[in-house]
Amino acid sequence: MKKATQIRFLIGFLLIVGLLYGYKVLKNVTDDPDPGEFTSVGYVAALEMTKQGGRVVLFDENGKRIEPNKPAKDGSSQWEDREVSWSVDGQRIFMSSTRESDSFLVYRWNPDRQDISKRAIGSRSQSAPWFGPFDDPDAKKLGLIQSGGQILEINIKTGTTKQILPPAVDETAAAEEGRRGTMEVLYGKFGESFVKARYAGNKNDLVAIMLNDEGQTAILHRLGFNNEGQLNRPIEIFRGKKVAIDVAPDGRVAMMVRNMTFPDQANIPSEFIKDGKVTKPFESGIFVITIGEDGFPKADAIAVLPFGSEESFGDIAVSPDGSKIAVVVGVSDGMGGFTPSGLMTMPFETNGGGSPSPVIGGQISSPSWSSDGKKLTYLKTEGSDTDVFVIGVDGSGERKLTSGGTYAMPQFSPQVAK
């Protein structure tokens, strides 16, 4: 009798556990109905620019092309995809698209199930999300997007967003500046709107690019308040006709500055005026940016080109282990325009440009590293076509993934082979 009671108790306990587990699974599916895993090691996502607009496409390691299902709506041929990105684990692809509305909103694509779901709330256009910092467990669901000239954090499970830059603080925080808005008070001297932002190793420090009349400005903003209870002010790092950033897993920031300009053209330091003419400390450069405990950025040069140099730098990408940086090289027109001539890698460290390794020549752009750091994907323009290529980091085995047309934003999956 006692044994039978124990058995009934055990069965009852297991049923309760099973119900609780089932409830948890059901809740997870309800919150985020996208189960299953997608093995994407070696896959490359990109945008194909067609007459109807951008289209997200995917290529496996053998070059097989995979396309998302078309939207199930009237006039479906008129939708457009504008940007593409990967989830931090490479399980899903995200895009900024007009699949269901006139605004570019965030969508998630599960290629294994051919499921595409809108992950955004609202009507204002959004960029594709970037997920990080790399070791943050929330990076699987929280991404940074640009929308309306601001930087927002999007929760891809709920579709809700939270304003990050400019900080969503009460106007009284800027009372000492008068009744101007936070954007003007904090960022007016840097630019009018945000182009891009990345966490620099933690969720307190953000490096962002702002757009202004002369070009772009890179800033660091440590979120929150200082010891006196005042809102932390952003700090300018560099400005130029063009600025680009990428982030290593350890939080160091790679920064490309093309056609450097001074923060205040009316008050240029006297040491940069010779015989009545303005000079510069450098024309273009690649830098490692680190953030000190005091919240101030430190810039160490990887490679710099002297004032007046026509040679310049283009797109950059840091390797998955943070040891190298891929750099497009070419010629600048002095006004921000750029003609690429090749791709090289160099150590991602101070003076790393002294040890360059050429990869491939040609009109190259948009490099991206494979998750094992052994390959690069990139765009190469030949004639009227801009195709997606893959090559070994040592320059061997170049292979074309596409066969004519115009492509953009090729990105290797970040997923690591098990």
Image: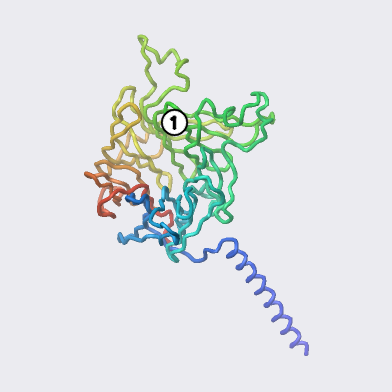
Q: Is residue 80 visible?
A: yes
Question: What residue appears at the point 43 percent right and 57 percent down from the top-left corner?
Answer: 416
User: Percent position (x, y) of residue 94?
Assistant: 46, 53
Q: Residues within 10 Å of mark 1 (few under 14, many from 20)?
A: many
How many marks do you count on the picture? 1
Is the N terminus in the top left, top right, bottom left or bottom right quadrant? bottom right
Query: Furthest-bottom residue in view?
Result: 1
Compared with residue 393, is residue 232 higher up or lower down, i.e. above or below? Answer: above
Q: Position of residue 251 (x, y in %)?
A: 50, 42
Task: Identify the amino acid type marked 1.
Answer: Gln
Q: Residue at x 67, y 73 (%)?
A: 17
Q: Nearer the viewer, residue 74 or 414?
A: 74
Q: Is residue 318 left or right of residue 356?
A: right
For this orientation, the residue located farthest to the top is 275
Give the colour scheme of this rendering: rainbow
Residue 227 lies in quadrant: top right
Judge from the rendering whether residue 106 lies leftward or rightward of residue 316; answer left or right: right
Q: Quadrant of residue 262?
A: top left
- Can you name the residue that lies furthest to the right here? 1
Dot 1 lies on which element? strand
Quarter of the picture containing the C terminus is bottom left
Q: Position of residue 178 (x, y in %)?
A: 65, 24
Quadrant of the rendered structure where residue 174 is? top right
Q: Is residue 370 left or right of residue 402?
A: right
Residue 26 appears at what percent x and percent y?
Answer: 61, 68
**Residue at (36, 56) in percent of width and height:** 57
In the picture of the structure, the residue carrying the numbered disc 1 is 216
Q: Looking at the image, can residue 88 be seen?
A: no
